[in-house]
Amino acid sequence: MDWKNMQVPERYKLGEAITGPFAAHLVALSGFSTADGSSELDVLDNACGTGVVTFQLYEHAPAIARARMSVVCADLSPLMVENVAARIAANGWVGATAQVADAQSLSVTLPTDDFTHVLTNFAACHLPDPRAGFREAFRVLRPGGTLAFTVWKAVGWYPHTARALALIPGAPALPPYADFVGSMVTATESGEGEKRKWVDPAFIEARVREAGFTEVATVLRENATRMAGAAEHAQAYSEITKLMLSMMWGDKVKEFGAQFEGALERAVREEVGDGEVVLKWEAYCVIAKKA
Ligand SMILES: C[S@@+](CC[C@H](N)C(=O)[O-])C[C@H]1O[C@@H](n2cnc3c(N)ncnc32)[C@H](O)[C@@H]1O
């Protein structure tokens, strides 16, 4: 996936109904909701996308804490950064800035021992080299700082996609979710066997400790999203699903892409008839400290 050149910010905004509640959990688990303004809060919203974590920070941190809060929104994609910069200006988020940065080499653009918090919503384990991402988060945090990130346990679009693909003659079968995540990992130190483990909380916790973090803890959270019916669902999800599949299959998606929306609608209708479509999303929220 060429993140730098994807025209995706608008799609991601739609996705905030899905990811926003988990960003809110990260913010709460990191203590922002009860921050009392007694210390500086210097936050990196790492791989920020459209700024869903930053939105939650400004929504939930009390005014007294916001007065001493700065937030750097960083993303590899200049389009995302442009988008979040406009959002910062539109919302008047005092103390927030946006810049391009690669989560795997933050030290190129961001200082060492600087942030009190690094928050990463749904990106830490989808980097080509997730270990490098954790090492860099450790480096930019100051001693006593907090790392918090989310990792999908189950994505709502996966089961329907598997059934839709099965309805299209010649389309590939959808592999287990762990394989999909593993297909994004290209780091050579993550050998083939390890690639599918970036969905396993014990494995992920071990990688976080390996980067130097202590007090590593994981909690599971869930969210449900709803669509009025199968047609609405297929219309909303077919393009974004094809984009996700192209991360794994590249141009192969074009071979069945034209049939996908119809197949998705049929697959969903077989399950819910004319009823509402409810998608279940589950994610691990991992919190760790730099001693
Ligand atoms: C699944 S989105 C998550 C965005 C946002 N945190 C959210 O919760 O909606 C993944 C984000 O990671 C960014 N990204 C991908 N590779 C990156 C890298 N190496 N360094 C920084 N950001 C990266 C993408 O541009 C995208 O905005």
Image (cartoon, rainbow, N blue to C red):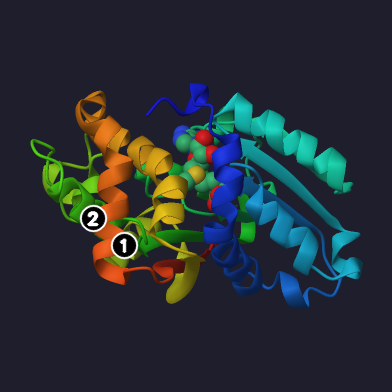
- Note whether ligand 1 is within 8 Å of mark 2: no
Image-based side of 114 in relation to 174, left or right:
right
Q: Is 248 rendered above or below residue 237?
A: above
Q: Residue 28 location, x and y as percent?
A: 65, 73
- Quadrant where the image shows the C terminus: bottom right
Q: Nearer the viewer, mark 1 or mark 2?
A: 2
Q: Residue 285 location, x and y as percent?
A: 47, 68
Image quadrant assignment for residue 192 = top left
Q: Which residue is under mark 1?
A: 206
Does label 1 or label 2 sit earlier along the sequence? 2
Image-based side of 254 in relation to 156, left or right:
left
Residue most toward the left? 170
Q: Which residue is under mark 2?
A: 177
Image-based side of 186 in relation to 287, left or right:
left
- Note whether ligand 1 is within 8 Å of mark 1: no
Q: As rendered, which of 211 and 253 lies closer to the eye? A: 253
Q: As rendered, which of 251 and 46 lies closer to the eye? A: 251
Disc 1 element: helix
- Of the residues shown, which amino acid type is indicated by label 1? Ala
Q: Give the number of callouts.
A: 2
Q: Is 234 rendered above or below residue 57?
A: above
Disc 2 element: helix
Q: Residue 135 location, x and y as percent?
A: 45, 45
Q: Residue at x 53, y 54 (%)?
A: 121
